[in-house]
Amino acid sequence: MRRLFWLGIGLAVGVVVVRKATRTAQAYTPAGIAGGLSQSAGGLVESLRGFVEDVRIGMAEREQEIHEAFARGEAFDDQFAELREDPHIGDREIFPEDRQR
């Protein structure tokens, strides 16, 4: 009875090891590598699509705010107007004059 028990355990461990080795070997074949790359690329594409969708939603919200302000007759609050008036202001803030190239 004891021998049969240990034989069963040995067979189970052997099956598990062979299955793991087969999966690992399959991952390093050209087909396995291509499958892994396609899954990675698919995940990257989905992340990029999500980012683009978030940007579009933000743009639509901001555009709606601008339209509502215009309908109320309020002036558009341009936060970057002074930066556009002086095109070099950003350079001075980022690179102080003593460190400019």
Image: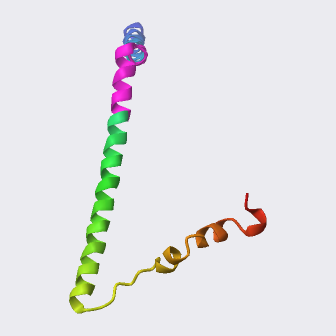
Q: Is residue 52 left or right of residue 101?
A: left
Q: Quadrant of the C terminus?
A: bottom right
In the depicted structure, whether residue 72 falls above or below residue 6: below
In the foreground, 89 or 37:
89
* Residue at screen point 30% across, 67% down: 59
Instruction: Please give the range of residues in magenta.
Output: 24-40
The location of residue 58, given as percent across then percent down, is 31, 67
Q: Is residue 70 left or right of residue 24?
A: left
The location of residue 89, given as percent across then percent down, is 60, 73
Displayed quadrant of residue 18: top left
In the foreground, 84 or 52:
84
* Residue at screen point 33% across, 24% down: 35
Magenta-colored stretch includes residue 44: no
The location of residue 47, given as percent across then percent down, is 35, 47
In the foreground, 46 or 18:
46
In the depicted structure, whether residue 87 falls above or below residue 100: below
Residue at the outermost right position: 98
* Residue at screen point 27% across, 73% down: 63
* Residue at screen point 40% across, 8% down: 7
